[in-house]
Amino acid sequence: MRDNGLIIVGLTGSIGMGKSETAKMFERAHIPVFDSDAAVHKLLAKEGDAEKVVAEAFPGISGPDGINRKFLGTKVFNDAAALKKLESILHPMVSDLRQKFFKEAAAEGHDMVVMDVPLLFETGGEKGCDYTVVVSAAEEIQRQRVLARPQMTVEKFEAILAKQMPDHQKRQRADFIIYSDQGLDSAENQVHHIIEQIRSQKQY
């Protein structure tokens, strides 16, 4: 538990595992969710706090709606130095938004928040959490889900997987695992059970 009394739960999972849908389940259970990807989108949008700085660092990637994230992604995907430069701009800004979110949640009387971070373990983000939850599914289900997405290819899917910690390693490091391949009702029940377990361990 943090100084503000909040329990911070890190939610993560590899591509196609059902993490975004699981985040909505936490929200339906009245647990505020900080979406790291949404925070980045907000920062890169037109007149977002990061738009001008990123546009200066990566010339030619601005569009009518702010930074062209797809084009930016191609610039940094296989360029470690470019990615590091982008992260040095975005990470402090995302951290500020996250702290503001936590402060507001505590002020509203919440005892728990979820931090939705796709690369939680890969970036060491679990150090800032009290508990970690990994969303997982059978490999063939994951593959079917991802390849059904528009403009997704096997090559692109495999390139994304190569940059993510293997699912079995994430499961080994997690405090809790949600299996998303057993139906939505099952996943929602798992979410409620985890919330109850965490609250039962809360130290007063």
Image (cartoon, rainbow, N blue to C red):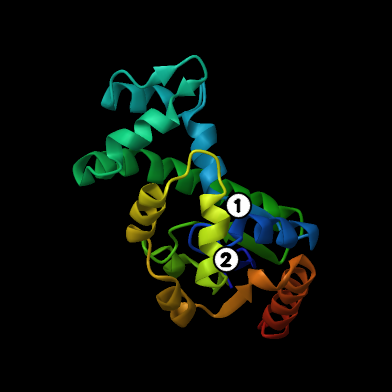
How many numbered tags mark residues here? 2
Q: Is residue 170 visible?
A: yes
User: What SS does tag 1 mark?
Assistant: strand
Q: Is residue 104 left or right of residue 146?
A: right
The answer to the question of whether label 2 and label 1 lie on touching residues, with beta carbons closer than 8 A, is no
Instruction: Give the quarter of the figure containing the C terminus.
Output: bottom right
Which quadrant of the figure has residue 6?
A: bottom right
Percent x, y for residue 157? Answer: 41, 52
Quick one: which residue is furthest to the top in this view?
Answer: 64
**Is 41 rendered above or below residue 67?**
below
Instruction: Give the quarter of the figure containing the N terminus.
Output: bottom right
Give amino acid for label 1. Answer: Phe
Give amino acid for label 2. Answer: Ile
Q: Is residue 120 left or right of residue 4?
A: left
Q: Is residue 11 visible?
A: no
User: What SS does tag 2 mark?
Assistant: helix
Percent x, y for residue 56? Answer: 29, 21
Instruction: Between residue 129 and residue 21, name the one nearer to us.
Output: 21
Q: CA distance from mark 2 to mark 1?
A: 27 Å
Q: Nearer the viewer, mark 2 or mark 1?
A: 2
Near mark 1 (Cα within 10 A), the count class, few <14, some 14-19 or many ≥20, is many
- Of labels 2 and 1, earlier in sequence is 1
Residue at (30, 43) in percent of width and height: 77
Residue at (26, 45) in percent of width and height: 84
Instruction: Between residue 16 and residue 97, name the one nearer to us.
Output: 16
In the rendered image, which residue does mark 2 sit on?
A: 141
Instruction: Between residue 172 and residue 142, name the one nearer to us.
Output: 142
Tag shown at residue 79: none
In the rendered image, which residue does mark 1 sit on?
A: 34
